[in-house]
Amino acid sequence: MRIADEVRILVRQRAGYTCEFCGVTETDTGGELTVDHFQPQSQGGVDALDNLIYACHRCNQYKLDYWPVEPEDPHLWNPRNEPASAHFVETSDGTLRPLTATGAFTLARMRLNRSSLVAHRQRKLAQVEEIRLLTKYKELVELHQQLNHQLSVLMDEQSQLLAEQRELLKRLLHRRD
């Protein structure tokens, strides 16, 4: 069954035009992503908004129609219900490490440490670091400007004091003569 255009737009907007599993955006992929049924229709899933996930083609492909049948079957992380931080931690090299059994299963099933995603996360980390450094540089420039202004004020005050001192010396010398 085809998802109505209005629902598709809502799902896209709600996800911020980003794959809710791996974090790549429409801009990153150069086009729209897919609307996935978290609980597949083949497993009884419905078209309700809370069952629809915005996913890139790869994540949709890797998830396929997986749904746990038995209670002991592993569960996929549902990005609509829990933050990624409940199941994964991102390391400084851009890889994700599982924190839970659900996280471990999701990482393996969805291949969330595939090389292109690790490179994507490394670029994002580098951008964050660049922004942090540029912000720090801007703060330093502003401090430098403040110091220069204070130095200029002090120089003006010193010039005024020297002028007053010269005037006093002249008066003292004039009285002496």
Image (cartoon, grey):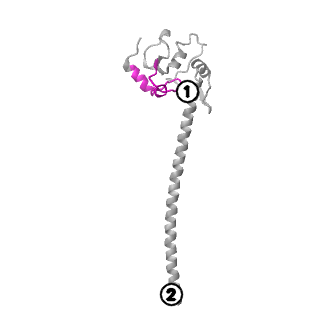
The percent position of residue 9, horizontal first and vertical second, equals 39, 23
Range covered by the magenta-colored residues: 7-35
For the point 49% across and 60% down, the residue is: 149
Would you say residue 33 sits in the magenta stretch?
A: yes
- Residue placed most toward the observer, 15 or 67: 15
The percent position of residue 130, horizontal first and vertical second, equals 55, 40
Residue topped by disc 1: 84
The label number, if any, that marks residue 63 in the structure image:
none
The tally of labels here is 2
- Residue placed most toward the observer, 49 or 150: 150
Residue 78 sits above or below residue 41 on the image: below
C-alpha distance separating marks 2 and 1: 84 Å
Left or right, 14 with reference to 71: left
For the point 48% across and 25% down, the residue is: 29
Under tag 2, what secondary structure?
helix
- Residue placed most toward the observer, 115 or 59: 115
The percent position of residue 168, horizontal first and vertical second, equals 51, 80
- Residue placed most toward the observer, 80 or 137: 137
For the point 47% across and 12% down, the residue is: 45
Q: Nearer the viewer, mark 2 or mark 1?
A: 2
Amino acid of disc 2: His
The percent position of residue 15, horizontal first and vertical second, equals 46, 26
Amino acid of disc 1: Ala
Q: Quadrant of the N terminus?
A: top left
Query: Mark 1 or mark 2, which is nearer the start of the sequence?
Result: 1
Residue 86 sits above or below residue 144 on the image: above
**Residue reaching furthest to the bottom:** 177
Would you say residue 77 sits in the magenta stretch?
A: no
Under tag 1, what secondary structure?
helix
The label number, if any, that marks residue 174 in the structure image:
2
Crowding at mark 2 (Cα within 10 Å: few <14, some 14-19, many 20+): few
